[in-house]
Amino acid sequence: MGEVFAGRYELIDPIGRGGVGAVWRAWDHRRRRYVAAKVLQQSDAHTLLRFVREQALRIEHPHVLAPASWAADDDKVLFTMDLVSGGSLAHVIGDYGPLPPRFVCTLLDQLLSGLSTVHAEGVVHRDIKPANILMEATGTGRPHLRLSDFGISMRKGEPRLTETNYVVGTPGYFAPEQMMGAEPDFPADLFAVGLVALYLLQGKKPDAQAIVEHFASYGTPAAPEGIPEPLWQVLAGLLQPDPQARFRTATGARKALTAAVEMLPEAAPEDEPVEVFDQIGPLPPGFGPTGPIPAPTPTPQDPQNPQTPQDARDGQNAQTPQTPRSAQDAQGPRPPSQAVPQQAAQQPYAQSPVSMSETGSFHLPPPPRQTAPSPQPAAPLPAQAASPYAAPVPDLSQSPTSAVQHEPALTRAYTVGQPQTPAPGAGVAPHPPAPAPAYAPQKRPGPSRKVAVPVLLVALVCFAVGIWALTQS
C-alpha cells in the first residue's frame, strides 16, 4: 500500500511530472475513486503562491481539467483533479505522426470550446502546448481532450509573480508580444493554439520564429503541403504576429473553424483510424478497479485445541463413509490382489483413526452390525427348597457383548432401551421404586400476623393525626 496523504489520499504510483511537482495516481478514500494528485516538491514562498493561485481555480467544463480539491500534510501540499489516462497530444503524435485534417478539426473545436470558458472567467492560460492537452482513453471512438496545467495562469489585472525582463512559458509557443514583455492577454493563448494545430497536422514542432518573420515580411503565406486551404485560413488568423489582426476571442475562432470544416473533403475509407490508448498502465498489486484490495484475514484457531494439517486430514478420513459389511458381501469374492489379510478379517471391530474435530469432540465410526445368536432354551433347574431370602439381582453389565444389538446410528442415547429384567417367576425380586425427593416449597420470609397488624394500625393512626393537623392550620 502507498503513503496516505492527509488521511484521505493514498499515493499509488507516479504518472507524470510538472513544472513544480510530480503527478501521482492516488485513491481518494472519501469519494472512493481514483484521482490524479499533483504533489508540490518545493516549498519556497514564490512556488507556494503559484500553487495557491492554481488550486484556487475552479472551472467546470468537459474540456478543462482544473483542480478539484487540495490538502496539506506537514511540509507537503497537493491538489487533485480527475484522472485522465489517454496521455497527451504528444503521445498521440508519437504513435501516429501527422493526423488527418478532420481529426485535427475535432480536437481544435474542443480546445477552443474549453479555452472560451477559461477566458470567460478572466483567466489567461499562458502555457498552451501539446504536453498540457490531455486525452481520454477513448480508443477508436470520438476523441476527448482536456486542457490542463494552470500553474502559470493568471487573471487579467492580477499582479505578476515574474521578475522584470523574465518571460514565463514554454519556448516555441510564445506569442510575439509575450517576448516583448506585454501584459498577458487572450490573443496570446490563441497564437499558441495555432502552433498546436500546425504540430498536429505536420507531426513535428513548428518554428514559431520563422513563421513570425515570414508573416511580417511577406504577409500570409500559401497553405503548407497537406493542409486544406479552408483550414489554413483559420490557422493563419490564429498565427498573425500582430495581436490586433489575430482572432480576438476563442469563440470567434471556433465559428470560423466550424465553417471551414464544412468545406473539407470527406475522409477516405482506407484512412487508418486514430486510436487513443491508455498511457498510464495497469494498477500495481494490491489495488483493483474499486480501490485497494483488503488483505485476507487469517482463520482464527482455538488456542486450547490447535488443529494441525495432519489432524485435518485424519478428520477427513474419519468422516469418509465406509461400505457396510453386507454390501461388501454382496459384491462377491475379492480378487487375489484385493484379498484382506487374515489377521484383519479376524478382528470384530475395525480400528479407524480417531481425530478431534474443531469443537473438541471425536469422530467415531459406527460399529459393524452383527447378528445376535438365537437364544437357547434354558435347561430346567432342579427343584430347590424355597429360600426366605430373595435371589441376588444379576449384574447385566457382565453379560457377553455378542448378545447386545447395535444400531448403525453414529450417536445414541444411553437410556434409549428398556431395562432388561428377568421374566416373572425367575425368583428375582423386583427393584423397589426410588423414593421421590422430598422438596418442600420454600416460602418467602416475612413478619408474622402478630407483628404486621399492630404496625398497620399505628400507621393508620399517624395518617389520621396528620390529616387532622393539616385541617386545623
Image (cartoon, rainbow, N blue to C red):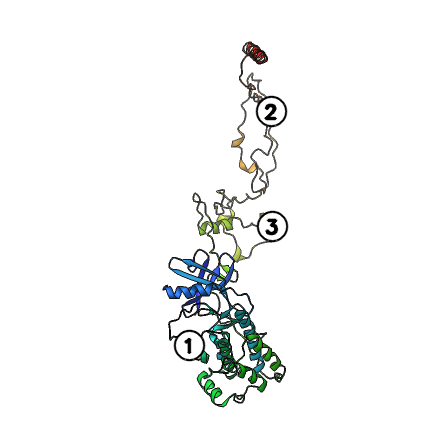
Quadrant placement of the N terminus:
bottom left
Whichever of labels 2 and 1 marks the residue nearer the N terminus, that label is 1
Closer to viewer: mark 3 or mark 2: 3
Q: Quadrant of the C terminus?
A: top right
- Which residue bears the numbered disc 2? 426
Task: Give me the C-alpha separation between circle 3 and circle 2.
Answer: 42 Å
Q: Earlier in the sequence, mark 3 or mark 1?
A: 1
Q: Residues within 10 Å of mark 2 (few under 14, many from 20)?
A: few
Inspect the image, locate mark 3, and give the three-letter code of the amino acid beneath it.
Ala
Residue 288 falls left or right of residue 421: left
Residue drawn 49% across the image and 65% down it: 57
The secondary element bearing badge 2 is classed as loop
Q: Position of residue 21 (x, y in %)?
A: 41, 67
**Which residue occupies the foreground of this view, 5 or 427?**
5
Q: How many other residues sit within 10 Å of disc 1, few (<14), some (14-19) or many (≥20)?
A: few
Secondary structure beneath label 1: loop
The label nearer to you, 2 versus 1, is: 1
Which of 97 and 406 lies nearest the eye of the viewer? Answer: 97
Question: Residue 181, labelled with which disc?
Answer: 1
Residue type marked 1: Gly
Q: What residue did someone put label 3 on?
A: 327
